[in-house]
Image: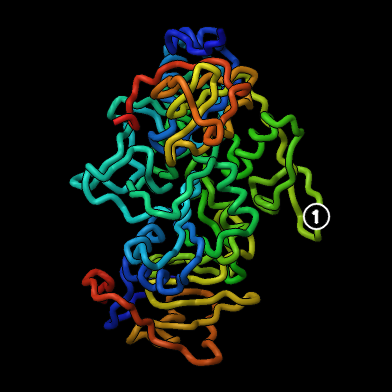
Amino acid sequence: MINKVVESAAEAVADIGSGAMIAFGGFVGVPGVPSTLIKAIAERGLSDLTIIACESGRGRAGAQSYGAGGGNQPYIPEPEDGVYPVGYLAELGQVRKAITTFSSLNNPNFDGPLEAGVRRGDVEIELIGQGSLCERLRCGRAGLGGVYTPVGVGTKIGEGKDVRYFDGVPHLLETALRPDFAIISAYQADRFGNLIYRHGARTTNPVVAGSGKVTIVEVEEVVDYLDPQHIVTPSPYVDRIVLSDRRLMVR
Amino acid sequence: MTPAQHPSAPSLSRVGIARRISQDFREGDVINLGVGVPMLCSLFIEDEDDIFLHSEHGVLGHGRTARTQDEVDPSLATAGRQPIIPRPGMVVMDHAESFALIRGGHLDATILGAFQVSVQGDLANFWLPGAIAGAIGGAQDLAFCARRVVVAMQLLPRPRRFVNRLDLEMTAPRCVDRLVTDIGVIDLEDGRAIVRELVPGWSLEDAQRVTEVELVAAPEGIAEVTLKSDRDDLWTAA
């Protein structure tokens, strides 16, 4: 009987080694960020990782809230509440390269963990817009070599990229990303690895799913049955399932 | 150029700029609000307006911001991390679909903040001098592909915000259609800065002291900025 559920996060990430290229799901802040798996990867004490993530500018120390909120305002959990963002790996010095859309806090007076690495000379940042990053990952999952997008032509982001004209409009080539591991979070899984997501926590997770040679998901619940018409990520994209140690959405 | 300040007339506050921008929204519009002043536009959108706010991580048509912690669903926030509540018509999608909406020209407008805008409509909003790396996020897709790009910009007392040529790294060329500023509304058309509206007490000559860009009066005349709201935080005293 197929059952992709793995006992622990540590077991699920045990074959991730130094030098691996890892894509992470999730957006700025907590919902949808695979915090349990990020913590487990961090505990392996790896080096020279290439990370691919929408947002990787913020670690756990000196965290600056992105949000409105704070004070008496309604509030969404932050890294100081025990959540591990992708930037935590950079904070520990485990990252050599980041392909990302927010690598910095864009504050000339305060370096995020990746920026500090660039100043030391041991980290490289490849900045790219979110639409293009998503399509590069989708290409990786879908067996495509790349896509032409009009976004970025004539800017620093487009430098050195192949340009072709379609209907008179210049487009640039963004090539597929095929990471070694795809690390994502979802709301519910069945034992086959079919996944559904909750609200804005869906974000890049279904895009990152299946882009890697191995996809590992953390979920809040494993359920007996998911309605086939509502499944977002089909099971063949998913290799391993672990339970999240966060319960952000199950209430 | 030294920062200018009008000696006696008030200017729009950040909330006032957002109020003016939101007055251009029409029923059925699909609109993305950037972080900062643009986010404040949501203060002025009611459910019955049927305006669809788009958050680039994949939420479209959400309701108002959550008012109490009980209303907060940790999985439901704007891209600017404001907790929000669902409403009928809301749809969630993955990030790639969300950017297909953007790139495919399905957004009526994007409201963005900017470090600098040129009279040609070039936008700079992702890389500040001195920073090691920029923060491009979704701004480049939005600026290249939204059908209309509106920039919320405080001109007072900041110099070199609205310029003839960008000093800063460019996000997208020739994309900005309208600047809604603390002193008035400026449309960018064919390399010219057409002043449509000024706040009461400001003349074209006063406005010209704020920017190096040559300002041109709209052919139909310059209207006064009027705000449809009685909030007390819309104006900044001189």
Mark 1: few/some/many CA within 10 Å (<14, 14-19, 20+): few
Is residue A233 depicted above or below A203 in this figure? above
The structure residue drawn at horizontal position 56% and vertical position 26%, both measured from the top left corner, is A23
The structure residue drawn at horizontal position 43% and vertical position 88%, both measured from the top left corner, is B223
Residue A92 is at least partly visible in this image: no
Look at mark 1 in the image and give the residue it sits on: A166
Q: Determine the image quadrant of residue B198.
A: bottom left
Residue B172 is at least partly visible in this image: yes
Residue situated furthest bottom in the rendering: B220
The structure residue drawn at horizontal position 55% and vertical position 18%, both measured from the top left corner, is A192
Callout 1: helix, strand or loop?
strand
Residue B14: image location, x then y, percent: 33, 65
Residue A4: image location, x then y, percent: 53, 13
Q: Determine the image quadrant of residue A251.
A: top left
Which one is in front, A140 or A90? A140
Quadrant of the frame with the N terminus of chain A: top right
Residue situated furthest left in the rendering: A72
Left or right: B136, with B100 as reference point: left
The structure residue drawn at horizontal position 40% and vertical position 53%, both measured from the top left corner, is B62
Residue A31: image location, x then y, percent: 40, 35
Is residue B182 depicted above or below A1 in this figure? below
Q: Amino acid at mark 1?
A: Phe
Which one is in front, A203 or A158? A203
